[in-house]
Image (spheres, rainbow, N blue to C red):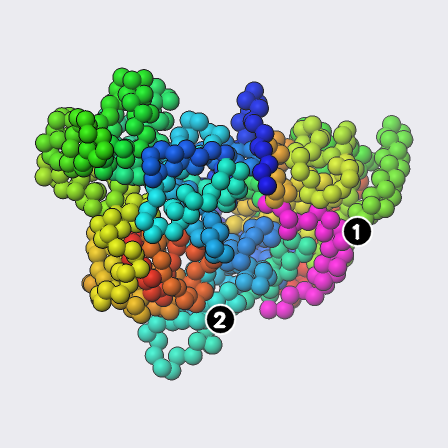
Amino acid sequence: MSQAPVNIRELLDRRKVGYSLEAPFYNSQEVFDADMKHIFGKHWMYVGVEPDVPEAGDYMTVQIGNQPILIIRDDDGEVRAFHNVCRHRGSRVCTHDKGSTGNLVCPYHQWTYNLEGKLLFAEHMGEDFDPSKHRLKPVHLKNVAGLLFICLADNPPEDFQELVDTMTPYIAPHQIANTKIAAQIDIIEEGNWKLTMENNRECYHCTGNHPELTISLYAYSYGFAPSAETDEGMKQYEEMVKERHAKWEACGLPSAEVDCLDTKISGFRTMRMPLDKEGQSQTLSTESACKKLLADFGDAAIGGLSFWTQPNSWHHFMADHIVTFSVIPLSADKTLVRTKWLVNKDAVEGVDYTVENLTAVWNATNSQDRFLVEESHKGSKSPEYQPGPYSPYTETLVEKFSNWYINRMKTLIGD
Amino acid sequence: MTTTLTLPDFSQAAPSAWQPGVDDTVKCVGIRQETHDVKTFVFRSIEPRRFAYHPGQFLTLELNINGETVNRCYTLSSTPTRPDTVSITVKRVPGGVVSNWLHDNLKVGDDVSVLGPSGEFSSFSLAPNAPKYLYLSAGSGVTPLMSMSRAHVDMSSNRDIVFLHSARSPSDVIFARELQAMSRHQPGFRHAVICERPGVDEDYAGYLGYLSAPMLELIAPDYKEREVFCCGPAPYMTAVKNVLQSLGFDMTHYHEESFSFETLNAASEETADVPAGDADSSSDGFKLSFTKSDLVVSCQPPKTLLAAAKEAGMRFPSSCSQGLCGTCKTKLVSGEVDMKHGGGIRQREIDQGWILPCCSIPKTDVVLDR
Ligand code: FES
Ligand code: FES
Ligand SMILES: [Fe+2]
């Protein structure tokens, strides 16, 4: 079956605001290649947390499209990123997902770089060889209060600094550097990454699909079309949010909504939201999953600080634990969703928390979401699929994601 | 200052297990005099902890001796079937800095830093399902085999175990009474002792001399059906191997613990009968031995360990020879070295006993795990 060549420019130009995207955005190779080049090649991506590399010499690797990347903590405690490509004959320098090393040594011919990427040693290269011309190539990295973002562009979007400045006070109280990764689960969704992201940006599907997640979420936080039955509830919810925000802000926990998902190159949104029942955590009981809190919050019921970034992440920060998600496209039809659960690094498994209880809600939710994404992806391949309208009440953030994506592509792809 | 540790609440679920390679602080809660020069030190964890390990594994003590931090590995003599304490059994060694320090200084109530269990030598991981075992030990090499035996007896595993221990004299037999009790409690467990000499115990009526082929055939006639685990000073283990090989034993069923600092040091000190310091001046340098390649070479400072190995024709993975690349990284089984590295190794690896032989000069005899 041969497909007609896709004209991305045309597709971008005819996208209808308020509607889902046309099929080729979800399943054509050309669009996927363009996504990797422009979206994942030129924006800041969330790839991990400081506790992925807790000590000097600890490294992690991540693959973005065809680019192997290496993230390492140097001897001064600073986290750095490099292209994980040896300057000799290109071998990957670090070959494991995670590890720890003195210097960076290529396994092929032992070219040896220090943690700043400087080539220290290369045998048999002769007198004229100049090691200083063969440093590991650096990758831009920003550590946002413990969340690690990288950018593969030569000149990364500068407005990311606004994200850093805005978000640092929100995230810092949760002390990521003082946590450990209690669990990490990678799932691969058989679907396009944009479907994964769109699915994340709405809770229209929550009532029907997420019995575990919705235990701790207020139904009114999902957004409702105005109607006589729900107006009163909606109003009460908004009152409560106002009241809690005032209380939390007074304790030094920024809570107010900030939303620039589609108004900035480095689009993001955040808000601290009350949780239902005990109000402590996204668990099946809504009580803390970990007895040792992340910091001395006084009260564990500080709701959940949510943080969404374009193009590839979302995060929930609670008093007792943090859940972070990064989305990495593997092909037009396959997407890696990497979830990490962080707890206080002094918390003892089996004593202060169990992994089972900690991960119960999001494990269930992730697998439900995987099903939803995979089903949309299958449907998008039908010749009868056509873009459908988003709800103006519960899918406003989906529209912002799509709008951001279309605008970024239009700008970057040229005419 | 001594704080008392609260006892665990045995009606509750067990606390979390000890993790390999993880630092912990333990408190010495008991010291037993086993023989005139052997003591057992019993430890409990300060954090609630269930000590999980394979019988035969060792822990690493981090001690502060005269203002210097030293790390030493000791095989656990305790058994994981009694998970609330661990113990090590240490023999005084003439000139042995750490073992003598433990004997003379460590008191009940003292806190000690330890690094969780490691080591490969365990019948429970190497041959868990063998129906019959032959445990051979000499001197303080008894500890890993005692740990394995205690676990079997505690579990009433009903394995057929012959425990054969060699000692200088009857008063040097470590755990003599307990071995008798174990033999009485468990029909499949038998033990025998071989002493070099009767010593003060003039009516000693057991085996005399050194382990030999006829002795082995007498004590464990079905030795060919047994999985053999051996631990003791290097000359002892060499002798055992010779005996077994001369009898045509299938050496794939032979396992030895070449690790213990204690037994190795004891061996060299016992055979040389001179303080270690004197060996420095001998003109042909220090002895450098390798556990896996069965090679012994000498290494005269300032020659590096890597250079000595290479001169002896050994193929040793290496590249920079300047302590940069880490390619030569090797576990130091025993001995001390002077290492000037260039970033090819991290402090925590050094703490775990790794060195870079390309930039290490021996300060004593050295055994490398290669
Ligand atoms: S490719 Fe890295 S050293 Fe040769
Ligand atoms: S050979 Fe490079 S560190 Fe030893
Ligand atoms: Fe969902």
Mark 2 and mark 1: Cα distance apart in space: 41 Å
Question: Which stretch is magenta?
Answer: A154-180
Give the foreground label among 2 and 1: 2
Observer-nearest residue: B99 or A158?
A: B99
Q: Are discs 2 and 1 less than 8 Å apart at CB?
A: no
The chain to which mark 1 is attached is: A
The chain to which mark 2 is attached is: A
**Image check: A194 left or right of B128?**
right
Give me the disc on residue A258: 1
Q: Is residue B261 above or below residue A284?
A: below
Q: Residue at x 22, y 27 (%)?
A: B192
Observer-nearest residue: A32 or B117?
A: B117
Q: Is residue A335 above or below residue B341?
A: above
Q: Is residue A252 above or below residue B142?
A: below
Q: Residue furthest bottom?
A: A128
Label 2 residue SS:
loop
**Image check: A252 left or right of A44?**
right
What's the amino acid at mark 1? Answer: Val
On the image, numbered disc 2 is attached to which residue?
A118
